[in-house]
Image: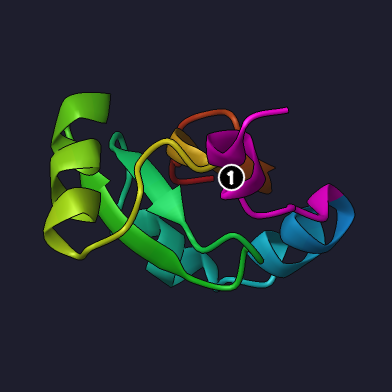
Amino acid sequence: MNDAARDIPWVNTNEYTENFEEIPYEEQLKYAGQYIAASLDGTTILVGGTDEREVESKLRTMGLNPSWPLSGLDVGSGGVGGWVHDP
C-alpha cells in the first residue's frame, strides 16, 4: 500500500446513509438536478454543481481533496443515487 492510499479517510457507509437521510428535504431540494459533494459522515451537503468537474473545482477551492469517497454524487430523494424531485 502506498502512502497516498493511506491519506483517504475511512467512510462508514451505514452512518453516511443514515445521516444523509436526515438532511431535510428542503435542503436537498436546493440541489435538485445537480451533482453534489457531501461531508464524509453524510451530515452536510458541501457543494453542488452542474457536473462532476464543477463540483471538483469547488472542492479544490475549499481546500478539499475531490478524490475522497462520496464526492461528485447526484442528490436523490431518500438518499444518494437519483434525482431530487417533487413528490
* Residue 24, quarter of picture: bottom right
Residue drawn at x 46%, y 32% as measured from the top left: 83
Q: Position of residue 39 (x, y in %)?
A: 51, 63
17 left or right of 53 in image: right
* Residue 87, quarter of picture: top right
Q: Is residue 51 visible?
A: no
Q: As rendered, which of 56 and 80 lies closer to the eye?
A: 56
Residue drawn at x 35%, y 42% as measured from the top left: 66
| Viewport quadrant of the N terminus | top right
Residue 14 sits above or below residue 35 on the image: below
Q: Position of residue 13 (x, y in %)?
A: 81, 49
56 left or right of 82 in image: left
Q: As rendered, which of 35 and 1 lies closer to the eye?
A: 1
Residue drawn at x 32%, y 44% as measured from the top left: 32
Q: Amino acid at mark 1?
A: Ser
Secondary structure found at label 1: loop
* Residue 14, quarter of picture: bottom right
Residue that badge 1 annotates: 77
User: Over which residues does the magenta segment extend?
Assistant: 1-13
Q: Is residue 81 visible?
A: yes
Q: Main secondary structure of the magenta part?
A: loop
